[in-house]
Image (tube, rainbow, N blue to C red):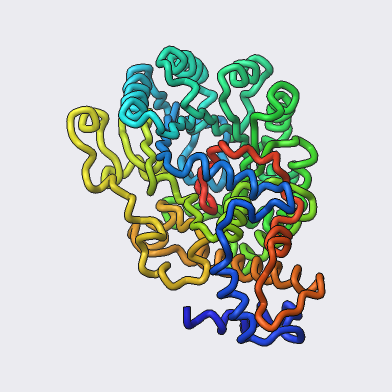
Amino acid sequence: MKNIPEFFTSPLFRHSGYTAHIRTKDFAVLFTSLSNTTKSDQLFLEQDNIIQKQQAYNLNNKDKKTFTMYLVLCDQCNLQCSYCDVLGKKDHLKNQAYMTWDTAKIAINELVKRIKLDPELNAQIVFFGGEPLLNWSLLTRICEELEKTGFNNQIEKMLVTNGILLNPEKAVFLKKHNVYVVVSVDGQEEINDKVRCYHDGTGSFSDVSKGLKYLKDIMPNQYGISCTLGSHNALSLSEEIVYLHEEFKPCCIGINVFHFQQDGTCPIEIDDKTLCKSLLSSFETARKKGIAIYQFANILKSFTTQQRNKDYCPACVNKLLFSPNGRVGRCETLMTDERFSVSLQDFLTKPLPPKLDWSKYTPEHEPTCFNCIAQWICPGSCAYDQFISTGSLNGVEPRRCNFHIQFFIELLTLVLDAMLKTNYRKKVYVPLKKHFASVAGNIPTSFPEHTIFVTGMGSMSD
């Protein structure tokens, strides 16, 4: 921690206007105080906010393990999004692989087996693609089969979709079977349609908005929005978030930083400075407007409770993915690479090989993270982006490191701001409960604590 003071004399901190009020060494004392603040569950009795709900959820689930199963129902998609990292630059309509019932049944049996071994298991299924609604008949059959297992109430279900094929009948079914729906949309029509298009280049927003309105009318407390951050919306991200929140009323919004495609490029790539500025601006907007943004909620929870943010890339925790091509692995984007997956036959007859043990690729095991000031709030890298950026699953990805360090300083500054605004003067700057509570701003309690927004800063795909 010897390098802490240099962050508080950085241009970012000097420009915050606090140098007239507090000396660098005093700010270092503040940091120490923050690090040693009580972890009491009573920390937020003064305010009813999202952090309180998250704390209660964590307390109730602290001894439970989570197992997330991805079922890629097909590798075909009715959109041709320019930045798609799962299907890449190839024609998304030409992919013909659809998951069969035999494969789905094997996956269900695996899930049930794990629940029987650990009755306290937090079990989750994510329906993924391509566009999973193209294989609607299989999705419905899986949901109906889960009800027969006797463990249906213990299994959280989520559908990640572009929303185009949603209709009232599908919404009614999804509501009945308690499937949480996440729809991908990147902002208002003129923004979204720059990158999320049909194969002929026609924009998708009009059709997606119809699907969102079905969800809004039929299952209003059971869906969220996934918004990918890139060059198309970075300068207006706050405006896009406000629009999506007010127009469609989702339970929460996930902001996901663009992924690189497998050739190492991304058509919506932005530099680190723009990325940080855009995210910090949207955080301030969320605080003022009361918008539940998943990634920020987890960071706030870690910052205020001084407990490590374990919203790691799910591939590095306990995630298993079944592809429509009969492969089993950890990551949907690396499934075609045999270094990172096994055949269905090998999965059924052999133990999982060491190449599929990614548990050591989290910040808790990464030496680079040990002395970082942001280590408690940072969920680490997306395993796929880490591999594409460096050629290895080890190490850290610079853009996420940079953002979380800047965000940590921003949160410290907000605490200090709250102290100064209340004429709080002490020889040693020890923040009070109300100073911590102010960091969350108006972020609401309506955030669904069970939501499987699988992301650190961007592993929710489109």
Which residue is at 28% across, 47% downward?
Answer: 357
Indicate whether 127 appears above or below 57.
above
Q: In this view of the protein, which residue sits in the foreground, 217 or 334? A: 217
Which residue is at 72% across, 32% downward?
Answer: 209
Which residue is at 50% across, 22% downward?
Answer: 153
Indicate whether 223 appears above or below 304.
above
Pinpoint residue 152: horizontal percent, then vertical percent.
Answer: 47, 20
Residue 75 visible in rendering: no
Res 342 → quadrant = top left
Total residue callouts: 0
Pinpoint residue 76: horizontal percent, then vertical percent.
Answer: 47, 30
Pinpoint residue 10: horizontal percent, then vertical percent.
Answer: 62, 82
Q: In this view of the protein, which residue sits in the foreground, 47 or 392? A: 47
Q: Quadrant of the C terminus?
A: top right
Residue 63 visible in rendering: yes
| Horizontal side, residue 129 vs residue 407: left or right | left
Pinpoint residue 106: horizontal percent, then vertical percent.
Answer: 32, 22
Q: In this view of the protein, which residue sits in the foreground, 281 or 157? A: 157
Indicate whether 213 appears above or below 407.
above
Which residue is at 79% across, 37% downward?
Answer: 247
Indicate whether 13 appears above or below 110.
below
Q: In this view of the protein, which residue sits in the foreground, 151 or 81? A: 151
Residue extending farthest left: 350
| Horizontal side, residue 47 vs residue 145: left or right | right
